[in-house]
Amino acid sequence: MEYFTSSPLFMPLVKLVGEYLGSEDWMHQLFHRTYLPAHYALPDPPVSAAACLFALPPHDDVDRVSRLPDALLHNIVSRLPVKDAARTSALSRRWRGVWRSAPLVLVDADLFPATSAVSSVLAAHPGPFRCVHLNDCYMDEFPALLTGWLQILADKGIRELVLVNRRWPLDITLPDTFLGMATLTRLYLGPWKFPDTAGLPSATCFRNLRELGLCNVIMESRDLDFVLDRSPVLETLCLEGNLFRLCLRLVSQSLRCVQIIGCFLEEIFVVDAPHLERLIQSEGCTPNGTCIKVKIGHAPKLHLLGYLELDQRHILEVGNTIIKAGTGVSLSTMVPSVGILALEVRLEVRNDAKMVPGVLRCFPNVETLHIKSGKTDQSTGKLNLKSWHESGTIECIRSRIKLLVFHDFRGGRGELAFLKFFFESALVLQEAVIVFAAAPSSMEEVQSKLDILGSMKRASETSIVLLTTRSDPQGGYIWSFKIGSDFSPADPFENY
């Protein structure tokens, strides 16, 4: 960060951002998130620098590998760093054309100097290009070369592209050449300023794009709408640390997973997404009292939703009804498809805790509930057990929830009142996992918490209560795009 803070452009930009967000305190968080996409935001490269070629042992002079079919040789070469893959041409006449005829896999981290080497590789290989990661080009000539590189990638059938800007300033406008890459199946960008799409041809289309990641990208809502509208098979959308606020409108016939990490958003509106199964949000930024409206429209397959932050950072709207404490339940305010729900709530703050019953009634078929207990220094009164019972029956707690995972348990009175109410009401609960916010200081503290929880009356005699310390440094959030978009585990929040 020292290089950037010494730049003459740094302080004016800090002032601009501070004025826009209402507080320069947010600048530190902003620059922490926007300097570069974090490791969790980018897909892993398909090759490793640890891979290498070995000569045959002295006692074995039979070249069995060269006898393999072309398809297998191509597979072998595509798993090597590009510099080693190109060197296979010198092994023998059999290998001479293998690298040039195999789909190119290029990771610039394997090259030095990266910028000139990338130019040479792109020119030498005829394509197609299976996967290109450009993450480490620092040279001054990088922006000037980029337009030509992108045109080569488009001409040679690029399928997967990761393109990271590591130069100051961060708001370099990305050449719109990439918008013509019709062969792309996966695209990750950041940090860039997205090109203005207003004057682009309506025929522009990512007809094969299935996964899109925008990391620290400065863009307008209309530009994201443009991309979504022209990506007919897009299944996964990942947004991380965007600089300025967006109204995210999800209109897509193909999206299955949307994951948002640390973005400045004014609204997340699921307008029409008939195949959306997961909507994951982690640590949204809401400067100076503003909030993010999460509006659920048409999403009949939405199965996993979270984290909804009930500490005034999120406003939930279902249909056309804003959900508040005491909002009456009706068919129009329910999302019956959701089976896994994650909420963050400060149970020690009365007004925040009062939101829980109304929100839970919107999701009558939840079977797995994650509660992340928010930390607070406020003293605004707490909901006691009587208050929870007076809030009335919550159907999903009474007859649906089989697993409760309570993250960041500190043993506060508000937390204990909620857990007592939950255990007394949950008829079909099978397991409750209580995750401490911090490792207990002694066995006596563990025993004390265990005695309190063990003494609570439980409506379900078969339920099991487990206590554990946090093993997840992310604190229950899903920070990894890979984890969030992987459908093989039923519940990606179960990372405790």
Image (cartoon, rainbow, N blue to C red):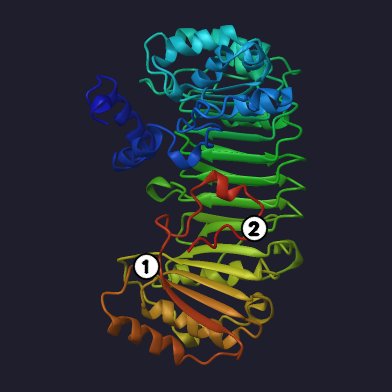
- Crowding around mark 1 (Cα neighbors within 10 Å: few <14, some 14 to 19, many 20+) is many
Measured along the vertical axis of the image, is residue 96 above or below residue 381? above
Q: Is residue 416 above or below residue 61?
A: below
Q: Residue at x 71, y 26 (%)?
A: 68
For the residue labelled by badge 2, is the local secondary structure a helix, a strand or a loop?
strand
Please name the amino acid that badge 1 sits on: Ala
- Quadrant location of the N terminus in the rendered image: top left
Q: Position of residue 61 (x, y in %)?
A: 58, 24
Image marks 1 and 2: residues in contact by CB distance under 8 Å? no
Closest to the observer, 35 or 66: 66
Q: Residue 466 versus residue 250: which sits nearer the camera?
A: 466
Q: Residue 238: tell me if it is visible.
A: yes
| Residue nearest the observer in this picture, 443 or 358 | 443
Q: Amino acid at mark 2?
A: Leu
Task: Give the residue displayed 29% in from the left and 82% down from the top.
Answer: 443
**Image location (x, y in percent) of residue 305:** 61, 57
Task: Determine if residue 222 is in view.
Answer: no
Q: Which residue is mark 1?
A: 437
Along the line of sight, which residue is nearer the eye, 102 or 2?
102
What residue is drawn where x is 56% and y is 50%? Answer: 483
Pointer 2: what residue?
304
The image quarter in which residue 490 lies = bottom right
Which secondary structure, mark 1? loop
Sequence-wise first label, 1 or 2: 2
- Percent coordinates x, y for residue 54 in the rendering: 50, 28
265 left or right, relative to 235: left
Q: Is residue 295 above or below residue 128?
A: below
As drawn, 422 above or below 172? below
What is the x, y in percent for residue 412?
Answer: 36, 77
Q: Compute the Cα span from label 1 to label 2.
A: 24 Å
